[in-house]
């Protein structure tokens, strides 16, 4: 395990009970001052300032525990690529037990996923003209037929019932996904890994339920659309 300043930084982040040990050097005291200021700024939500303080502490005393603090700030600033690199650097340099190592590996995975999500949300650039096959399309105009009375179209009636039901189910799933997103956001701002893991587990449960309900709702609504279309023709 890390000694001196590193023990305390790791203690604050990974929820251990190590007491800060004074380093009897000018550099050690200066690193401690940067760490203390960074901790205060982090707690106030001033993540950019906290990031600079933790970087300064690491440059003075190259304790890998500071790398974890740097990664935490980068994650809060949505610099997911930078946070992933810092977490990986921490794993390379630090000597931690298997449970803590797996927790940090999970954070690395989260940062990779966050980067992929950001890329997926970016709007497409440029446009592509439709393909031209040089063939002339001919559309026949079919005269409309009088629709049958609604009480003679049971499939259409079933479709009318299923469509709003599907929308209600999909809306419920959307609410669960919204709750999942909120819990994930809370997990990302949690200082201690224990709280973060609990919140993320709840978020994963809501997400799974939300996707299930949305899938069922869409399937039911589409079934209603098909039944309505088929029933209207009979």
Image: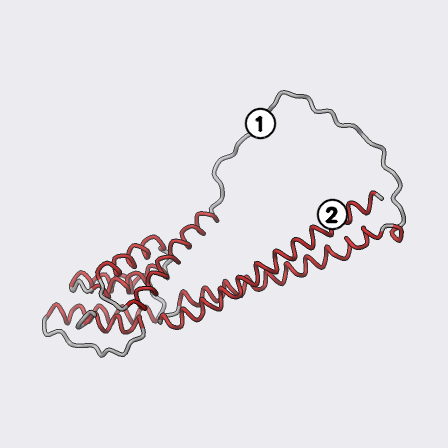
Q: Which residue matches tag 2?
A: 226
The image quadrant of residue 53 is bottom left
Q: Position of residue 211 (x, y in %)?
A: 57, 58
Which residue is pictured at 30% across the width and 70% down the height? 13
Q: Position of residue 35 (x, y in %)?
A: 23, 69
Q: Which one is in front, 224 or 176? A: 224
Quadrant the N terminus occupies: bottom left
Q: Reply above or below: 125 against 138.
A: below
Which residue is pictured at 19% across the width and 65% down the height? 63
The answer to whether the residues at label 1 and label 2 have Cβ atoms under 8 Å apart is no
Q: Which one is in front, 124 or 45? A: 124
Q: From the viewer's perspective, is 106 left or right of 33?
A: right
Within 10 angstroms of label 1, few (less than 14), some, or many (20 or more) residues?
few
Secondary element type, mark 1: loop
Q: Which one is in front, 135 or 69? A: 135
Q: Which residue matches tag 1?
A: 131
The image quadrant of residue 92 is bottom left
């Amino acid at each position: 395990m890390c000694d001196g300043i590193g023990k305390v930084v790791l203690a604050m982040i990974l929820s251990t009970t190590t007491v800060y040990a004074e380093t009897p050097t000018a550099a050690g005291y200066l690193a401690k001052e940067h760490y203390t200021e960074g901790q205060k700024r982090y707690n106030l939500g001033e993540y950019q300032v906290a990031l600079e303080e933790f970087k300064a502490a690491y440059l003075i005393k190259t304790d890998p525990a500071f790398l974890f603090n740097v990664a935490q700030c980068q994650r809060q600033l949505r610099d997911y690529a930078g946070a992933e690199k810092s977490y990986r650097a921490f794993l390379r340099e630090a000597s931690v037990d298997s449970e803590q190592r797996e927790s940090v590996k999970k954070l690395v995975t989260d940062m990779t996923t966050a980067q992929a999500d950001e890329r997926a949300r970016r709007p497409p650039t440029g446009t592509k003209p439709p393909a031209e096959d040089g063939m002339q399309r001919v559309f026949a105009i079919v005269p409309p037929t009088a629709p049958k009375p609604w009480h003679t179209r049971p499939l259409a009636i079933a479709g009318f019932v299923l469509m709003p039901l599907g929308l209600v189910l999909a809306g419920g799933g959307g609410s669960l996904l919204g709750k999942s997103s909120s819990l994930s956001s809370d997990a990302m701002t949690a200082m201690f890994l224990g709280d973060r893991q609990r919140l993320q587990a709840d978020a994963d449960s809501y997400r799974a339920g939300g996707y299930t309900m949305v899938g069922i709702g869409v399937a039911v609504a589409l079934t209603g659309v098909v039944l309505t279309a088929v029933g209207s023709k009979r």
